[in-house]
C-alpha cells in the first residue's frame, strides 16, 4: 500500500497527525494509496515556512519569476504523458481528457508569463504643482487554494500560477481523492527554479481547511467545489479578514432553437453532457429544445449517439468516451437522483441503471442516462447531478427557454445553438449567466479571459485567470510624491564676487 505525503519546504514529508484517507482506483473500487490528513499544527508549519520564503521571491523582479514559469511549461510538456496517467489512475477519466486537464492549466501558466506587463501600475506626471502620482501592484504575501477532485491539475494551476507570478507564496490543499498530480506539479516547479517553501502542498480534510481559513498570516483563499462548501468558506474566510474567491455548483442549460443544425447540436450535447462522466462544472446537464418538433428531432438524434457511448477504464484505450465516477458514494447519489426522476414522472429515454462492465463489477461506472419531458420542479432539474445524466426540458418558445436558464439558482455556464445572429445576440445580452456559448457547448474562456459564473455559482467579485487573477493576488498601493525645488541647480565651479 503506497503512503503519500505532504510537500513542505522543498521535500516530501510524512503526515504527523496519524489520520489518513483512502485514495481509490475508481475503475476497480480498490484502495490504491493512503494520503495523510494534516492537523492544524502541520498547516501552521507550512504557513510559517511560506512566510519566510515569500519576501525573497517577491523581491525577485517579475521577469525572473516569469522565467521560472517558462521553464515550468517546458517541464509540463515533457511530462505530459506521466501526469495524465497519474491523473487517470486516481480520478478515472480517460487519458485524452486527463491530458486536456493538464493542458488547460498549462495555458494559464503561459498567460502568467506575461506578469511583467500585467503588474505594471499607472503613472500621472504633473498631477499638481511639482506632484507626481503612481500606483504599484504588490503581492499579498501567503495565499492558499482549496481545489476539487474533478480537475486536479487544471484548477491548482489556475490558482498558484498567477499567485506565484505576482510574488506570493502559495499553500495548496488539493482534494484528498486524487492528490498525486498536485504533488508532481510542485516538484516540477522547483525543478524549474522555484525556491523551496514558495509553493507547498498540504493534504487534508475539513480540519486542514479550517486551519487555513483561520490562520492570520494567510491573506487570500481560493476555492472550487460545491455551493454549500463555497458559501461556508466564503463566509468564514471573509470573517477572518481574508480576500476570498469561491466557485460553486452549476446547472448549465443549452437552448436548441428550431433553426439549429440538429446533428451539430446532438454531437455537442453528447460531448458536453457525458464527457468526463459529467463530473465538471461546465458540463451541459439540461437541454432545452424550443418547440415540440425541435424536441422530437433532438431526441431522435441523441438516442443512437448515447447508446453507442463506450464506457470503460482509461486503460482500455483512447476510444473510451468516459470512465467511472470518482467514488462509490458519488455513484450512489447519481443513481438515487435518477430514480427520483423516474418517480417524479420524467421519461427515462435511455436507462443506464443496469450498466455493468465485465471484469470491473466493483468499479464506480455509471451508464449514460437521458431524460425527456422533465419539469422545473423535479429534483433532477433543480440539483446538480454531477454524473452522466442529461435532462431535457421542452420549451414552447424562445422566451420560455430563456426564462428557464435565467430563473435557475445557478449561473455558471450556458449555450444556445442557432443560425440566427439576432437571436444569439439577444441571448448573450440578456442572460444572467457568467459564461455564454453561441454554438459552443462548453464555453470555458481561454486563459487570457476570465472564468467565473453568476448567482449561486460564485462568491466573490473577481474571477479566475485572465487579468482578474492578477487583481486578486495583488494589492494596489498609490504614491503621491512632491520633490522640493531648487536642488536641480547643481554645483558651482567659480568664486562668487564679493557683495
Image: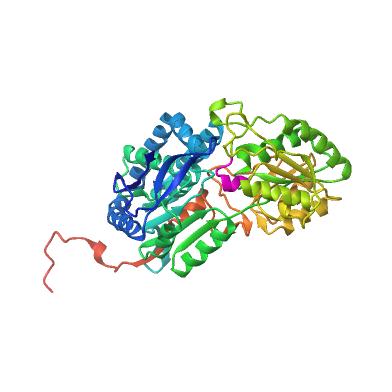
Residue at 26%, 62% (x, y): give it.
488
Across and down, in percent, residue 456 comes to: 62, 59
Across and down, in percent, residue 411 comes to: 66, 55
Across and down, in percent, residue 96 comes to: 55, 31
Q: Quadrant of residue 277?
A: top right
Dividing the image into 4 quarters, which one contains the N terminus? top left
Front residue of this view, candidates 468 and 375: 375
Magenta segment:
325-331
Residue at 71%, 47% (x, y): give it.
338
Q: Give left or right: position of 352 versus 43.
A: right
Residue 263 included in the magenta stretch of the image = no
Q: Is residue 317 visible?
A: no
Front residue of this view, candidates 412 and 346: 346
Residue 327 included in the magenta stretch of the image = yes
Across and down, in percent, residue 263 comes to: 77, 32
Front residue of this view, candidates 159 and 8: 8
Q: Give left or right: position of 158 versus 19.
A: right
Query: How are the colours assigned in the image?
Result: rainbow
Q: Give left or right: position of 63 versus 273.
A: left
Front residue of this view, candidates 483 and 418: 418
Quick one: which residue is furthest to the right in this view? 293
Amino acid at each position: 500500500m503506497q503512503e503519500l505525503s505532504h510537500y513542505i519546504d522543498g521535500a516530501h514529508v510524512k503526515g504527523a497527525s496519524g489520520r489518513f484517507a483512502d485514495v481509490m482506483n475508481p475503475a476497480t473500487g480498490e484502495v490504491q494509496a493512503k494520503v495523510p490528513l494534516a492537523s492544524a499544527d502541520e498547516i501552521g508549519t507550512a504557513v510559517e515556512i511560506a512566510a519566510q520564503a515569500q519576501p525573497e521571491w517577491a523581491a525577485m523582479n517579475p521577469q525572473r519569476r516569469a522565467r521560472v514559469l517558462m521553464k515550468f511549461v517546458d517541464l509540463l510538456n515533457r511530462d505530459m504523458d506521466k501526469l495524465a496517467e497519474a491523473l487517470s489512475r486516481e480520478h478515472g477519466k480517460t487519458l485524452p481528457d486527463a491530458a486536456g486537464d493538464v493542458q488547460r492549466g498549462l495555458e494559464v501558466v503561459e498567460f502568467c508569463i506575461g506578469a511583467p506587463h500585467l503588474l505594471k501600475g499607472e503613472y500621472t506626471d504633473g498631477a499638481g504643482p511639482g506632484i507626481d502620482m503612481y500606483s504599484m501592484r504588490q503581492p499579498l504575501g501567503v495565499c492558499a487554494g482549496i481545489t476539487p477532485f474533478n480537475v486536479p491539475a487544471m484548477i491548482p494551476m489556475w490558482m498558484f500560477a498567477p499567485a506565484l507570478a505576482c510574488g506570493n507564496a502559495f499553500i495548496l490543499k488539493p482534494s484528498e481523492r486524487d492528490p498525486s498530480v498536485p504533488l508532481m506539479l510542485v516538484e516540477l516547479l522547483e525543478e524549474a527554479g522555484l525556491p523551496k517553501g514558495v509553493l507547498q502542498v498540504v493534504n487534508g480534510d475539513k480540519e486542514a481547511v479550517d486551519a487555513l481559513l483561520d490562520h492570520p498570516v494567510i491573506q487570500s483563499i481560493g476555492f472550487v467545489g460545491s455551493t454549500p462548501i463555497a458559501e461556508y468558506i466564503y463566509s468564514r474566510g471573509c470573517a477572518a479578514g481574508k480576500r476570498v474567491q469561491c466557485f460553486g455548483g452549476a446547472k448549465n442549460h443549452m437552448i436548441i432553437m428550431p433553426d439549429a443544425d440538429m446533428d451539430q447540436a446532438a454531437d455537442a450535447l453528447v460531448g458536453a453532457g457525458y464527457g468526463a462522466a459529467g463530473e465538471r462544472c461546465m458540463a451541459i446537464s439540461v437541454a432545452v429544445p424550443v418547440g415540440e418538433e425541435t424536441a422530437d428531432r433532438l431526441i431522435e438524434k441523441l438516442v443512437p449517439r448515447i447508446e453507442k457511448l463506450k464506457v470503460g477504464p482509461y486503460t482500455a484505450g483512447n476510444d473510451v468516451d468516459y470512465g467511472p465516477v470518482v467514488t462509490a458514494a458519488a455513484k450512489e447519489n447519481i443513481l438515487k437522483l435518477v430514480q427520483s426522476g423516474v418517480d417524479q414522472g420524467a421519461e427515462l429515454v435511455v436507462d443506464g441503471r443496469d450498466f455493468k462492465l465485465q471484469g470491473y463489477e466493483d468499479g464506480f461506472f455509471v451508464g449514460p442516462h437521458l431524460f425527456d419531458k422533465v419539469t422545473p420542479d423535479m429534483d433532477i432539474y433543480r440539483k446538480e447531478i454531477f454524473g452522466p445524466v442529461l435532462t431535457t426540458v421542452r420549451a414552447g418558445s424562445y422566451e420560455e427557454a430563456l426564462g428557464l436558464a435565467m430563473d435557475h439558482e445557478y449561473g455558471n455556464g450556458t449555450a444556445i445553438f442557432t443560425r440566427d445572429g439576432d437571436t444569439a445576440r439577444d441571448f448573450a445580452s440578456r442572460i444572467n449567466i457568467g459564461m455564454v456559448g453561441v454554438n459552443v457547448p462548453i464555453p470555458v474562456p481561454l486563459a487570457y479571459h476570465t472564468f467565473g459564473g453568476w448567482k449561486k455559482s460564485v462568491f466573490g467579485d473577481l474571477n479566475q485567470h485572465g487579468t482578474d487573477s492578477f487583481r486578486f493576488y495583488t494589492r494596489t498601493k498609490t504614491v503621491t510624491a512632491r520633490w522640493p525645488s531648487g536642488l536641480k541647480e547643481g554645483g558651482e565651479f567659480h568664486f562668487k564676487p564679493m557683495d
